[in-house]
Image (spheres, coloured by chain):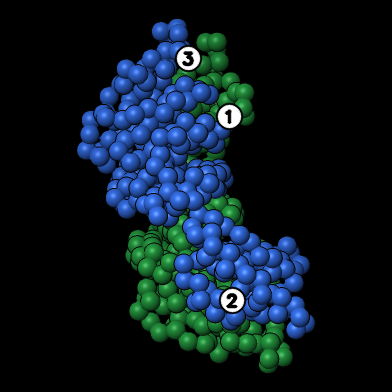
Chain colours: A blue, B green
Amino acid sequence: MSETITAGMLVIGDEILSGRTKDKNIGYIAEYMTALGIDLREVRVVPDVEEDIIAALNALRTRYTYVFTTGGIGPTHDDITADCVAKAFGVSIDHDPRAVAMLRERYPNPEDLNEARLRMARIPTGSDLIENPISKAPGFVTGNVIVMAGVPSIMQAMLDNVAKTLKTGTKMLSVNVDASGFPEGAYATPLAAVQKNHPGIIIGSYPHFDGKSFTNQIVLRGRDADALDRARADVEALFAALRAAQ
Amino acid sequence: MSETITAGMLVIGDEILSGRTKDKNIGYIAEYMTALGIDLREVRVVPDVEEDIIAALNALRTRYTYVFTTGGIGPTHDDITADCVAKAFGVSIDHDPRAVAMLRERYPNPEDLNEARLRMARIPTGSDLIENPISKAPGFVTGNVIVMAGVPSIMQAMLDNVAKTLKTGTKMLSVNVDASGFPEGAYATPLAAVQKNHPGIIIGSYPHFDGKSFTNQIVLRGRDADALDRARADVEALFAALRAAQ
């Protein structure tokens, strides 16, 4: 069995906490990590406040293999992520010649590459850059922290670029068993017994309410395909028995 | 000036971290808190793991006026939020007669109110209940922690019921100034100067990228309407000057 690779995610931005912007990056990164074989274990959302960002960075980077951040790397005064990452790692930060070159590609006219835009080339010392095919200002990787834009399309392009450099583990496999027609209370006790018999498999019950009725799904997850098949067979047998008893 | 009322939010569930379910509660609660005059300061998403839930509950409940949790209060074995809240507060947990009565209303037939469903009446000692008009199993308030369902429609109904009992502060006011047509790099330096002149107002620049071009918005937030007006006038003057110079 290969090593388990874990991740935390840090969403940075007042606009998410005020409700003005609805985050679209958590769900995207969660699904992406699952497909890569990386376990996303925790997400935090913090405001554009230096001490909050640094505290969250330090909590997450010491706990997980990787930390993915979104937001706060533009040219305006409220974009403070790069400085916070440098402070969290205790490294200096300055204009990175590679990043300046990327911005020059976008702003060939020297007067357009003003002080504010050059802020986007300030990168913590020792970082690797992540190419940004859309607006050029790069993301970066400092230690185990992967710093990306908050704008979803740019974040997604950066994630594609950085993904190939990441260590990945054995993929988490997942199967669904349809429990529609049964309320959770009708199967919770026997389902708990199935869970007990399959400790290596994580079994969850997910109710969905459409405003009128519930349609539930049982989701089984695990890294061992044979063990997953055995657990699924038991869950299917459970629902076959419940149907027969109706 | 009234006291500032703060909140943290804890989203509980493997399904959010695996990407299978896309969270809809963070954005909803964020907007709701802003309308109430409560500052949402932090959000965490954790898996259905007891020690992770308890650690997050304790971190958030000691830091903010209120903590709102979503998820993990159904009848199945993976629903462990109530037990974790009891452990975090060091109080006992048992079937609450008020909650049992609510469930009896939904399941008048005694054989339908089975052991699994009765799990949903297990409430930490000393809690107030939150009525659930949809599926009856209540949410609850333990100390400053407000425990709600994960299913969005049920969470929203619970939030309406609990909202009237909450302390609220002076509402955060917000105004937008349209910056469409200008890239962030064109206004970042003068905007930082406006921010410096209005330290009581939080000024943010929010780029939106539609796949082709950016349309940016400047958002100003603050609790003092006059101060907000003065800051807005300065931001509007900035963009008027930029337009004149085009």
Instruction: From the viewer's perspective, tell me whether residue B238 is left or right of residue A231.
Output: left
Q: Is residue B165 visible?
A: no
Instruction: From the viewer's perspective, tell me whether residue A233 is left or right of residue B8.
Output: right
Q: Nearer the viewer, mark 3 or mark 1?
A: 3
Q: Quadrant of residue A130?
A: top left
Distance between the Cα atoms at labels 3 and 1? 16 Å
Distance between the Cα atoms at labels 3 and 2? 57 Å
- Which chain letter matches label 1? B
Q: Residues within 10 Å of mark 1 (few under 14, many from 20)?
A: some
Q: Is residue B211 visible?
A: yes
Quadrant of the image for the C terminus of chain B?
Answer: top right
Residue at coordinates 51% horizontally, 83% vertically from top-left?
B122
Q: Is residue A156 above or below residue B124?
A: above
- Picture coordinates of residue B22 (x, y %)? 59, 52
Residue at coordinates 54% horizontally, 20% vertically from top-left?
B182
Q: Nearer the viewer, residue B168 or A77?
A: A77
Q: Quadrant of residue A190?
A: bottom right
Instruction: From the viewer's perspective, tell me whether residue B91 is left or right of residue B141.
Output: left
Name the residue beneath numbered marker 2: A191
Q: Nearer the viewer, mark 3 or mark 2?
A: 2
Task: Tell me the amino acid under the disc marked 2.
Answer: Leu
Q: Which mark is residue A106?
A: 3
Q: Nearer the viewer, residue B233 or A19?
A: A19
Distance between the Cα atoms at labels 1 and 2? 46 Å
SS at badge 1:
strand
Q: Residues within 10 Å of mark 3 (few under 14, many from 20)?
A: some
Q: Nearer the viewer, residue A173 or A104?
A: A173
Q: Nearer the viewer, mark 1 or mark 2?
A: 2
Residue at coordinates 52% horizontally, 65% vertically from top-left?
A227
Q: Is residue B190 above or below residue B151?
A: above
Name the residue beneath numbered marker 1: B209
Q: Nearer the viewer, residue A136 or B49?
A: B49
